[in-house]
Image (tube, grey):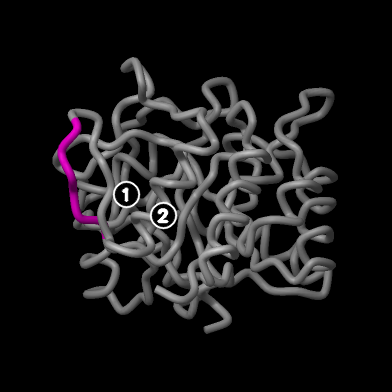
Amino acid sequence: MTAIDLNSDLGECYGAWAMGDDEAMLAIVSSANVACGFHAGDPVGILKTVKAAAERGVSIGAHVSYPDRVGFGRRDMDVTSPELTADVIYQIGAIKGIAAASGVSVGYVKPHGALYNRIAHDAKQGQAVIDGIKAIDPDLVMMGLAGSPILELARASGLKVVAEAFADRAYTPSGALVSRREPGAVLHDAGLIAKRMLQLAHDGTIEAIDGSTIKIDAQSICVHGDSPGAVAIAREIREAFEKDGIVVRSFLTR
């Protein structure tokens, strides 16, 4: 692999509640998954993040979620398909408007948190999200968990897709993310994480939480912007890639 996308979840501040360091992260990543207000983010903060991303040439994605600000979008919800489709349309429409006001466009959609995990294997909710994306802009790329059925479902529905791996999360032997409720689910050692991502870029493999080696075919790597030490982790990964001759570049610019 000679080039890979590095993304982060940004624009998640809400009023007096600060979350992450968007300015610092935008100097490192190539794609920004910008909150759309349902799990985090307020209009002024989202606009600020989109403008900062535009200034740095960072690709912008709509980070759509269940309507769950209190739970930061990490609580599973059993919503109807029409409701979920409408929620997705609403959120993408909001970020598209802010992007247009900033002189840029939205290129992809990445579901957030519990919605992301649910649709990885839930075809009903997955199709509802896909239908929402297609209804507002069928040219948007859908980002999803590498190796999960949602990617094939989206392809079959006519969407372009990009497979994603997570730098700061542990994996089960089946290729799923270890639940945040479990010990060891979130990784913090920047050096170790960078080595894991180099292995992923070179071999398409990563070590699961039980020590086994699993295959992951991913074109984008995520560092969660709200994780402790997120900026240091992202910087360590980028520096490791650059030293190894791997270019960090948005999948939208290839």
Q: Residue at x 32, y 42 (%)?
A: 80
Q: Residue at x 14, y 42 (%)?
A: 174
Secondary structure beneath dot 2 equals helix
User: Taking the image as drawn, is residue 35 in sight?
Assistant: no
- The residues colored magenta run 211-216
Q: Picture quarter containing residue 131?
A: bottom left
Residue that label 1 marks: 81
In the picture, the disc for residue 85 is: 2
Q: Residues within 10 Å of mark 2 (few under 14, many from 20)?
A: many
In the picture, the disc for residue 237 is: none
Q: Picture quarter containing residue 74?
A: top left
- For the view shown, which residue lies furthest in the bottom direction? 254
Is 127 or 173 nearer to us in this picture? 173
**Left or right side of 80 for 95:** right
Q: Are marks 1 and 2 in contact (CB under 8 Å)?
A: yes
Task: Reply yes or no: does residue 213 show up in magenta.
Answer: yes
- In the picture shown, does residue 183 fall above or below 81? above
Q: Position of residue 78 (x, y in %)?
A: 31, 32
Q: Position of residue 105 (x, y in %)?
A: 69, 74
User: Taking the image as drawn, is residue 160 in sight?
Assistant: yes
- In the picture shown, does residue 41 fall above or below 132? above
Secondary structure beneath dot 1 equals helix
Q: Residues within 10 Å of mark 1 (few under 14, many from 20)?
A: some
Q: Residue at x 49, y 74 (%)?
A: 3
Amino acid marked by disc 1: Ser
Q: Position of residue 92 (x, y in %)?
A: 58, 59
Q: In which quadrant of the rendered image does the N terminus lie?
A: bottom left
Q: Residue at x 81, y 48 (%)?
A: 23
Q: Position of residue 4 (x, y in %)?
A: 48, 68
Amino acid marked by disc 2: Thr
